[in-house]
Image (tube, rainbow, N blue to C red):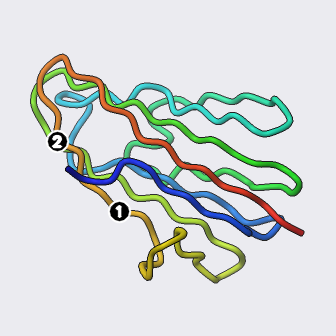
Amino acid sequence: MSSRIGFWSAVPDGAKLRVSVTGTTKKTLVTAHPFVLRGDGVEQTFPDDQIQPGPLEIDLEHPNTYSFFVDLVYTTSGKADVTAEVVSGKKRIPPDGSDDTQFETTVAGSQGQTLGLTFFIVTTK
C-alpha cells in the first residue's frame, strides 16, 4: 500500500504548499474538492482544476497548523499520481522522516471507490 499521509513540522512562515494530481484524466478520476483547515478555524475548498493537474499552491502562515485533505473519487478503475511539496523561497523542505524533497505516491482505486490523502503542516517563525 502506498503512503497517503504526509507531515511537515517547523515550516517557516511564508512557505508554500504545492499539491498536484496527475496520471489520469477527469474522465477516469474525479478529484473531490481539496479542503484546507487552518489551526485558527479558517476553512478553504478549491475546485478540481486547481489541483488536477496543478499544482495548487497554498500560502503557509505562522502561527498556524494546517490540515490538507484530498479525496480521490474514482468513476472507473485508475491510478492517481499525487505530489506534494513545501517550498520556502527556492528551498524544498522534505517531509518529516524522509530524505526526499517532496511527497510522491501513486494511489490505485477501483470504480466507485473514494480514497483520501492527508497532509499536516506546522509553521514556525
Numbered label tally: 2
Q: State the image coordinates of residue 65 (x, y, percent, origin top left).
A: 75, 48
Crowd band around label 2 with a 10 angstrom C-alpha radius: few (<14), some (14–19), many (20+):
some
- In the rendered image, the residue lying farthest to the front is 97
Q: In this view, does 121 lie to the left or right of 114?
A: right
Q: State the image coordinates of residue 125 (x, y, percent, origin top left).
A: 90, 69
**Residue at left 63%, top 41%?**
67
SS at mark 1 in the image? strand
User: Which numbered dot is residue 24?
Assistant: none
**Residue at left 73%, top 28%?**
43
Q: Name the residue under label 2.
A: 108
Q: Which of 106 and 5 is in front in this view?
A: 5
Residue 83, compared with residue 52, is above or below; it is: below
SS at mark 2 in the image? strand
Q: State the image coordinates of residue 50 (x, y, percent, origin top left).
A: 50, 41
Residue 97, compared with residue 22, is above or below; it is: below
Q: Name the residue under label 1.
A: 104
Q: In this view, does 33 lie to the left or right of 76?
A: right
Separation of disc 1 and disc 2 at Cα? 13 Å
